[in-house]
Image (cartoon, helix red, strand yellow):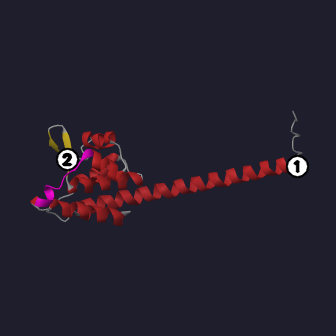
Amino acid sequence: MTMKLMQAGNTAAMTETVTDAAENDLSRIGEIAKKYGVTLRTLRFYEDKGLLNPKREGSTRLYTHREEARLKLILLGRKVGFSLRDVKQMMDLYDPKGTNAKQLKLALDKSEKQLSRLHKQREAIEDAIGELSNAMSAVRGMLADRPLPVAANG
């Protein structure tokens, strides 16, 4: 996770230094939604929360490579269970001219806590699976001891 965050962060860092030609390579909101499998409403919601800031031409939202990199970070963060607040905190610490040590430390701290939560959830799920499997075995045993109902002809 941290490696993916760092890779995505590096992608975001690289997009900060794109040339003017690459800045003109913009994608419409519908294209971005389709490409990343999200709804238009989701993209607008992320914009309202300050996570994305697409360029505007009239009412048209246009996404740069930098905004796409930010969206990738948001989706990765959500996939592993981070809150949008956590994702925003990590992204807001990004400084294209700095070492980003504070950002990386925060990402690592949040990742360690989330990993611990996920391990606990996995244990709970494994326990539930075991209980359900045992219950199903007991029901199968009860069914095996009983005669099958006779189907009515008619």
Q: Is residue 26 above or below residue 42?
A: below
Q: Does the image show residue 98? A: yes
Numbered disc 2: secondary structure = strand
Residue identified by numbered label 2? 62
The 10 Å Cα crowd at callout 1, few under 14, some 14 to 19, many 20 or more, is few
Image location of residue 86, percent across then percent down: 33, 50
Q: Quadrant of the N terminus?
A: bottom left
Residue identified by numbered label 1? 145
Asked if the residue under mark 2 is in contact with the one under mark 1, i.e. CB atoms within 8 Å, the reply is no
Residue 24 magenta: yes
What's drawn in magenta, residue-wise?
A: 21-29
Tell me the amino acid under the disc marked 1: Asp
Residue at (28% x, 49% y) in the render: 31
Q: Which mark is residue 122?
A: none
State the residue in front, 149 or 105.
Answer: 149
State the residue in front, 60 or 2.
Answer: 60
